[in-house]
Amino acid sequence: MWNNDFQLMHITGKKLYDSFMQELDSRDIVLSKNIRILPYLYEMPEALNIANLLISSSGAITIAETSAIGLPSILIPKSYTAENHQEYNARAFEKARASIVILEKDLTGDILINTINDLMNNKTKLRIMSINSKKLGNKDATKEIAKLILEIIAK
């Protein structure tokens, strides 16, 4: 059962914000106070750190940020990306039991809501997903990249 005991932030991207809001208006959809639609979020690190669950595509930056803080997720890989890399990213998180994957072709409102409800009503599963997500993160990635750059420069 869906309730309003949550805060949902949906970031559309600047290009899609106006058309998204117009679509809501054309369907006479009135959002409750716990739902915010934003074109962009400059405070993404803060938002991720207080989130209980991320629903997102599975680009490299997003999953790196997600695993750095150990955030459980529902990943919906974009189907049109080069060499289907987002699905590969998402499947790696799914295999590690850090994420639930829903392909775009399978995505419906009911599937998404049921998946969210199942997770939000199972704190144990969310905690396990969080732990597994954190295991995938690499907090030393910046140092490792800098070290590689210095080694290349030295050669």
Image (spheres, helix red, strand yellow):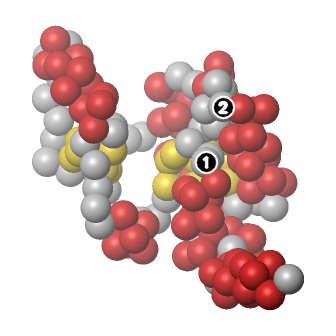
- State the quadrant of the C terminus: bottom right
From the viewer's side, name the closer residue of 46 and 40.
Answer: 40
Position of residue 5 in the picture relative to residue 124 (left or right): left
Position of residue 81 in the picture relative to residue 9 (left or right): right
From the viewer's side, name the closer residue of 121 and 93.
Answer: 93
Residue 140 placement (x, y as % from top left):
68, 86
Residue type for callout 2? Thr
Residue sitting at 50 percent across and 26 percent down?
110
Residue sitting at 34 percent across and 73 percent down?
46
- Residue 145, image quadrant: bottom right
Mark 1 Cα-neighbour bin, 10 Å: few <14, some 14–19, many ≥20 = some
| Vertical arrangement, residue 6 with respect to residue 12, above or below | below
First in sequence, mark 2 or 1: give its number.
1
* Residue denoted by label 1: 59
**Can residue 35 be seen from the camera position used here?**
no
Residue sitting at 64 percent across and 25 percent down?
80
Residue 88: mark in rendering: none
* Residue denoted by label 2: 81
In three-dimensional space, the C-alpha distance between marks 2 and 1, rounded to whole angstroms, equals: 9 Å
Residue furthest top as drawn: 26
Secondary structure of the residue carrying numbered label 2 = loop
Residue 108 placement (x, y as % from top left):
53, 22
Residue 24 placement (x, y as % from top left):
21, 22
